[in-house]
Structure formats: structure tokens, C-alpha cells
Image (cartoon, grey):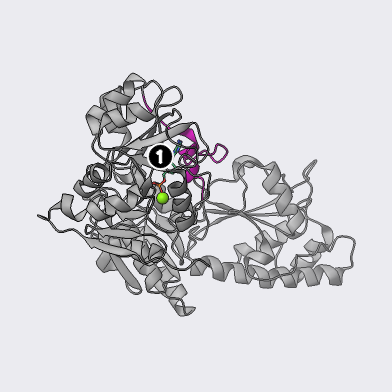
Amino acid sequence: MRTPLETKQFRVMPGDDLKEILKEPGKILREGGLVAFPTETVYGLGGDAENAASSRKIYAAKGRPSDNPLIIHIADFSQMEAIAQELVPEAKILADAFWPGPMTMIVRKNDRIPMETTGGLDTVAVRMPSHPVARQLILTSGCMIAAPSANTSGRPSPTRAEHVSDDLAGKIDAIIDGGPVEIGLESTIVDLSDGIPTVLRPGYINLRMLEDVLGQDRVRMDPGLMEENTRLRPKAPGMRYKHYAPRGDLKIVEGSEGDVVETINRLSAKAIEEGRRVGIIASSETKSRYLQGDIAEIGARSDDKAIARHLFGILRRFDDDGIERIYSEAFDTPRMGTAIMNRLIKAAAHQVIRAGRRVTRVIFVSGRGVCRAPMAAELMRRQRLIRPVEILARGRLVLFPEPINQKVQAVLQGKGMELADYESRVLKNEEISDTTLVFTMDAAQRADIIQRFAGADENNTYVLSYYVGDELDILNPYGGNLQQYGLCFEVLNQTIGKLAVKLNETAGSLSESKEERI
Ligand code: AMP
Ligand code: MG
């Protein structure tokens, strides 16, 4: 362990003489030290961008992976010209429209900025901040300031000076407290280094605003950011890492307002019953409808700038309060929704619950579909379900339709159940809708189905017994005597009873399922 640094605190209030107050922090930067400062987006951790040793210190203080480059903060367009290779025309267009402001451009670099600052890349990220303290600090120090967000790597970005102290006190030379920031999410990053301008990180400046100045087809989103695309990686190194994560387990609940409130209330009640501390991130509109837990009002849906501004602070407060389970509404608002959901989904490690999606069909699948699957289906049809569900029996390997196994028929008859007209059928992909649950009798069948059927995945296809909390497979009685078939019936009967209880408890909601996004 290194001995902790004494972290000097500076405070600026409206009306203060910035030039005077920032003299000392400016000197610290010039001499290779680290200074955290407010910008309009989030607090930055600054060092002299041209000093490789300063950049190394930034990585060390944050615990940041060394291949994740820093953004260089400038106060004049000529500084970008000084560190970039020849600029494409879009650079000037974007600077005229959005600088000073919350937009970062990636351009090809020359030799002036060391590789330590750009994480080994031959491109460089540049931004001209509008915050008066940030601007004056650049001017007073005489440095271009390399600054990532002033948080410990992986934690939510700091939107107040106290957040910076919590993470970095003792590790950096100074913190300038300029009060809470205005925007609360990091800058929009636009890549100009490679073909059509591409948004690598969404932010306050949204795609529409960029299209307005560059033209409709002259800017696009990084396909690696798109939710449908799980194969491509985001181009900005920082967007690939685990990020913004609170210590508690965060899940996003999306759906209609009523379904979301109902689901969050149900999940919270369950977690609290299990002795967990629960936090809820609610909009102003729905806040009063939550029944228990620590309810954080993030802002009105009609004011998504407020939502953006409060997000990271709430995640940090929940950490401070030892919150273990966090349920958040989704905020797909028109103006900043893309940026908000990008951060929230990362913070939730992609755990998105779709509220109000109810199971409409249950398919039991066994090998040939003549024994366990039809027995399970018939038992299920006799359960009392709160919400109606279509129940099917299918086989994985059905060459031609067969009637039910004779011993199964005998066991069923003994229980007053009969399946005289049954014919086995093979499972088809079209039968697995997005509100279907598929149950197999053992793990090998499950793996096979998930592999072979596009519609089947970890979130809708389960081993029947595991789904209800048992650990044994439903053994195939094939070739056994009547008693063994009877035993199989009893096991299935119990298991199906538990399944019905589980479906009724969750009101048939598919909401426990996770969704992989981005
Ligand atoms: P931070 O300011 O902490 O949000 O980190 C800066 C962000 O900018 C990270 O996501 C980086 O990966 C991204 N970035 C910085 N320089 C480059 C570059 N040359 N190419 C792509 N992304 C970059
Ligand atoms: Mg960051």
C-alpha cells in the first residue's frame, strides 16, 4: 500500500473569482499531479494530457484497465488541431454546433499525446467542456487535461464532489467542489476516425440532434451498442467493461405502468420477506404506488433530464445504505432515454424483467412423447390455475404418431383418468411463442432443445423438477413394470402440483426471466 496523499479540497461558489481559486489546482496539474473537477456531465479526474506519468497515475487511482483511453479536455478548437492528424470536415461542424458542451469526438492522433493517455490507441478523444470551472482550469493550468470520470473504476460516475471523495480521497492531490453537476451522464462520444460518424456512447446530445447538423444518413449508432446485437462488441473500450454497478443486485422492470408497479411491489415484498434491504427507483408519477422498501424518486417522466441527473447519485446512496436488492422502472423516454437506459442496463448487468408478460402456453416434452409428457400434461390440466394456460404434450423424437404407452394408460385408468384419443406429436419451433414455458424431464433434453430450437432458451426452457425447486429428474419408466409407471405418476403428480402453485403465485407472470441486452 502506498501512503495516502493529502487530498486538498477547494470549493467554488457562484460569484467567486475562479482565476484566483484555480491557481493552486492549476499548478498541481502542471507539476504532474491529479485534480478532480466538475464538468457539466460528471466530475472528471484530471491530469496533464501530455504527461505520460500523470496518465499512469490516473489509471492507478481509479483502478482503471490500462487499455481504456482517457478523454482530453480542451478550451479552444486550435488545441484539437494541434493533437490530431488532418481533421475531417465533420469535426468543425460538430464543434460549431455542440462545443463547448457534452460531446466528445474521436479523431486520429499525432505524436503529441502519449500512448499512455490513449490506452495504446492511435486515435484520441477530445472534448471542450462548458462548465466554467473546467474551462478556467484548462486555461489556468495551461494544460490540455486528460480526464476520465472521477470514480473508482466500475462504480457509478460521480455527480457531486462527495462522490469523488468517497472513491478517491487519499489517492489524488485535489478535489474542486463545484456543487452537483447539471447533466449527470457522461458525454456523447462520436467517432470521426473511421468512415461515417458513429455514436460510441449515447449521452445528452442524442442521435436526432447529431442528424440535425450532419444530415440524416451521415451519422449512426455503433452497432455494438444495439440491444439486439449480442455478437458485436462496442467500439469504445470503456463500453465493454462492467460499469456503473451498485453493490446491490439491480433489476430493471419494464412493461405497462400498472404491470411494472405490480411486479416491483411483488418482488420487493418477497425480498423483504427474505430479510433483504430493498431499494426502488421510481418516477414521480408512480412513486406513491409502491408499498414498501426505500423508494427513491428519480424524476418525472416528462423531465428526463432530471432522471439522467439523479441516476448515479441514487445508485451511490443505495450503496451507502446497504441496499441489497434494487428494482428500477425502465426510462425509455424520448429525449435522453437511450443514454439513460444504456447506463441503467449496464448497471443492472443486463437483468431486465418484462412485467405483465404472462405464460399462455406450457409444453411438456419427453423423448417419444408417449409416456411422461402426456402424463404431465394431463395432470396439469386437472390443476386449478388462476389464469388459463394452454397445455401441450410433445416428444423430441417422434417419427410417426403413436398412442399413449399402454402401461401409462393403465396407471391413468386406475386414477380415473383416461387418454384414449392421444397421439404423440413432435415439438415444433413455431409452438414456442414468447409467452411459452417448455418443460423437459431431464437436463440432457433441455440442453438439446435449447440448442436445436431457435425459440428455446435458458429463460423459457427448464427441467420440470428443477423449476419447482426439486433436484431429481423425472426418470423414464420405459421397460419397467406397472409399479414403476405408478411411481413415475406419483412423482409427476407432486411436481405438477408444485408447478401450479408456482404459476399461481406469480400470477402466471413470466417476469422472473432475464433478458440479455446490449
Ligand atoms: P470516461 O470519461 O471515464 O467515461 O472514459 C472515457 C470514455 O471514452 C471511455 O468509454 C473510453 O473507452 C472512451 N474513449 C476514449 N478515447 C477513445 C478512443 N480513442 N476510441 C474509442 N473510445 C475512446
Ligand atoms: Mg468513466
The residue singled out by tag 1 in the image is 50
Is residue 397 in the magenta section?
Answer: no
Q: Position of residue 109 (x, y in %)?
A: 44, 29
> For residue 477, which quarter of the picture?
bottom right
Q: Nearer the viewer, residue 71 or 393?
A: 71
Is residue 225 in the magenta section?
Answer: yes
**Start and end of the magenta stretch?**
219-241
Q: Position of residue 34 (x, y in %)?
A: 37, 54
Residue drawn 60% across the image and 46% down it: 432
Residue drawn 67% across the image and 48% down it: 450
Can residue 265 be seen here?
Answer: no
Residue 319 higher or lower than 258, as above or below = below
Q: Position of residue 292 (x, y in %)?
A: 34, 74
Q: Could you tell me what secondary structure mostly forms the magenta stretch?
A: loop
| Disc 1 within 8 angstroms of ligand 1 (CB) | no
Residue sitting farthest toward the left: 15
Q: Position of residue 134 (x, y in %)?
A: 25, 47
Crowding around mark 1 (Cα neighbors within 10 Å: few <14, some 14 to 19, many 20+) is many
Q: Secondary structure at mark 1?
A: loop
- For the residue marked with disc 1, what is the amino acid? Glu
> For residue 187, which quarter of the picture?
top left
Q: Nearer the viewer, residue 215 or 121?
A: 121
Q: Ligand 1 shows up in which quadrant of the image?
A: top left
Residue drawn 40% across the image and 69% down it: 319
Residue 470 higher or lower than 218, as above or below = below
How many marks the image carries: the answer is: 1
Can residue 404 be seen here?
Answer: yes
Q: Nearer the viewer, residue 423 or 89?
A: 89
